[in-house]
Image (tube, rainbow, N blue to C red):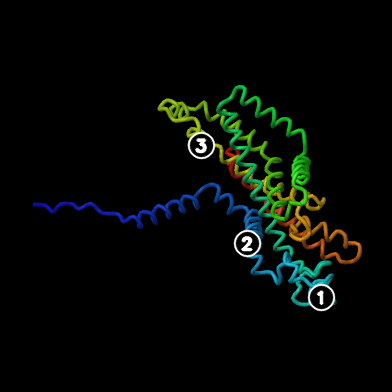
Amino acid sequence: MSDAVVPHRVEPNAAAARSGTSWLKRALDSDIFYSFRRSRMTMVAAAITVLFFLLAIFASQLSVQNPFDPAQLQLMNSRISPLWTADGQSPFLLGTDEQGRDVFSAILYGLRISLVVGVLGVILAGTLGITLGLIAGYVGGAVDGLIMRIADVQLTFPAILIALLVNGVAKSVLGNRLDAMSTLAVLVVAIGLSFWVQYARTVRGSVMVEKSKDYVAAAQLIGLPAPKIMLRHVLPNTMGPILVIATINLALAIITEATLSFLGAGMPDTMPSLGTLIRIGNNYLFAGEWWIVAFPGIALAGLILSINLLGDWLRDALNPKLR
């Protein structure tokens, strides 16, 4: 009598590890990762972008002082030049501003504010735009016409003007009750309402193409509700253009926040972003304290450039015509 064949039992942890390994292998073998490895400029841009995010996350550990805490600031340390100059003093690597804030520490904390506003603004704009784009493309008819006409009207105004309008209305309504954190929330809403149109128009066009395909008809035939079809079946097939728009809009959102802060309609001096630091330093540029404006400006330019380079690469990598 032959021995019975005992089926091999796969442990859940081993199966999960094998699944994770296979997913990682597929990602490393994908065309996108191959395109990423071939572009040295993209790899450098990605490294710089990650570095900026890490600097913002670990700002409290890397800075020599908390520039948002007035108790740690001393006016006797104001306008000290960078450390490598003749008048430089330790530990102020990039010098200090007129309030005695260490410029390097202020850049780290300001970078955190700028990235928080930019990321949350992109998330809000993406959520609003994707939702309206899905509804307009899938439902069609009068709903589609209404949403697209609103989008067309908003496109006639620059994004910075929409952000200024929303910011001004919020400040006129709230007045003195608008503290630093409330100002940050207003900036996020203003930026989110300024950039949703691109998501809506892109998603609408993709949905109008996808909803005529067989898998959508099959989902409708078995009785799946429209929200489930849109979110689980149609939306995943439109994620490529959305990722490109989100990456490019992150840079635009950070620039918009910096512009608002430079114009005095953004973050206050007590909780400065990169735009606020540039505005403060601009007042002392012709007095010889060039470092107060130069280093925040360099940090902002480097961040925007690296994100834009990533967005350009992602747009080309996800374009099937360029493969």
- Residue at the disc numbered 1: 88
Decide: few, some or many residues near mark 1? Use Cα within 10 Å; few <14, some 14-19, many ≥20. some
- Residue at the disc numbered 3: 231
Q: Position of residue 138 (x, y in %)?
A: 55, 28
Q: In the rendered structure, which amino acid carries the disc numbered 1? A: Gly
Residues at marks 2 and 3 touching, judged by CB atoms closer than 8 Å: no
Upstream in the sequence, badge 2 or badge 1? 2
Residue positioned 66% across, 26% down in the render: 146
Q: In the rendered structure, which amino acid carries the disc numbered 2? A: Ile
Left or right for 63, reference 234: right
- Residue 312, visible in the rendered structure: no
Residue 51 vertical placement versus 81 (above, below) = above
- Residue at the disc numbered 2: 57
Upstream in the sequence, badge 2 or badge 3? 2
Q: Residue lying at the far top in this picture: please name it.
A: 141
Upstream in the sequence, badge 1 or badge 3? 1
State the residue in front, 112 or 183: 183
Residue positioned 18% across, 52% down in the render: 5
Which quadrant of the figure contains the C terminus?
top right
Residue 49: quadrant of the picture: bottom right
Q: In the rendered structure, which amino acid carries the disc numbered 3? A: Leu
Q: Position of residue 192 (x, y in %)?
A: 67, 43
Left or right for 290, reference 238: right
